[in-house]
Amino acid sequence: MDIEKLDKKSSRIKNMFNSISHRYDFLNHFLSLGTDIYWRKRSVKIIKSKNRIENPLILDLCCGTGDFSLQFAKMGNVIGVDFAEGMLRNGLEKVKGKRIYLTCGDALLLPFRDDIFDIVSIAFGVRNFENLERGLLEIRRVLKKGGIVAILEFSNPESRFIKKTFSIYFHKILPFLGNLISKSDFAYSYLPQSVSQFPSHERMKKILEDLGFKKVTYKLFFTGISALYIGEK
Ligand SMILES: C[S@@+](CC[C@H](N)C(=O)[O-])C[C@H]1O[C@@H](n2cnc3c(N)ncnc32)[C@H](O)[C@@H]1O
């Protein structure tokens, strides 16, 4: 496996998402056979069961075209932040009439004061951070004391059988189809590479704890193809 460290310079990631934004939703659902929809819905159900605040204020980071924000809007008001304008533009129509406000910004340098959000969520975004620790500290900064952080991210499956079978799809078929359909020569090869280099479940839990999050737990979806990490400030 190629273990050369991926170039996650913010400008490169932003350009990449802007370039595939017109095909993002279709490819997401097509390449995951719709499981991404289930994972977001299930995650919000779990977070809802932990939330004690009525009408919480939610910050959905790396909101892209707004799919996670749309699920959270069933719970409270949502501010969705993403630095790729193309992704946001493709989400505008979807969030129309819902209590969601999409805005352009960098998750590593948030334009919000300390301690204001009840929940900060991020789906399939944290893996792209140029600096993971800095992004997690920004999340902690803007969360209220007792507020919930919820991170949904791809990960490496724990079952050997699933890992082997899934690997053929994830490392060969998905990049081929994704790059072809999105007309990108890179975005869908970057996806499995960035997942391979993302910390293991236990390591990610430890990182969150070391940065001051409490009650950190994680829930694996489909033996760990994706995982939801939850913690409290
Ligand atoms: C894989 S998409 C996920 C979009 C959405 N959350 C979803 O569930 O479909 C990742 C998104 O993260 C955004 N992103 C990555 N790094 C970011 C950063 N530092 N600040 C803001 N957005 C970022 C990208 O522009 C992209 O829209």
Image (spheres, rainbow, N blue to C red):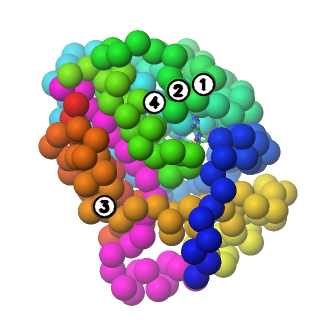
Residue 175, visible in the rendered structure? yes
**Disc nearer the start of the sequence (4/1):** 4
108 sits left or right of 229 in the view: right
Q: Amino acid at mark 3?
A: Arg
Whether the residue carrying mark 4 lies under 8 Å from ligand 1 is answered with yes
Residue at which label 4 appears = 60
Q: Amino acid at mark 2?
A: Leu
Q: Amino acid at mark 1?
A: Gly
Circle nearer the viewer, 4 or 3 = 3
Residue drawn at (42%, 25%) of the image: 59
Residue drawn at (41%, 43%) of the image: 133
Callout 4–callout 2 Cβ contact below 8 Å: no
Q: Is residue 47 magenta?
A: no
Residue at which label 3 appears = 203
Q: What is the C-alpha distance between the residues marked 2 and 1?
A: 8 Å
Q: Quadrant of residue 89?
A: top right
Q: Is residue 152 magenta?
A: yes
Residue at which label 1 appears = 105
Picture disc at residue 117: none
Callout 2–callout 1 Cβ contact below 8 Å: yes
Residue drawn at (73%, 46%) of the image: 12
On-image quarter of the N terminus: bottom right
Magenta-drawn segment = 146-168
User: Could you say where residue 137 lies in the image, as x and y percent from the top left?
Assistant: 37, 34
Q: Quadrant of ligand 1?
A: top right
Q: Amino acid at mark 4?
A: Asp
User: Could you say where residue 103 lies in the image, as x and y percent from the top left?
Assistant: 60, 20
- Secondary element type, mark 1: loop
Residue drawn at (50%, 52%) of the image: 127
Residue at which label 2 appears = 109
User: Could you say where residue 80 lies in the image, as x and y percent from the top left?
Assistant: 52, 25
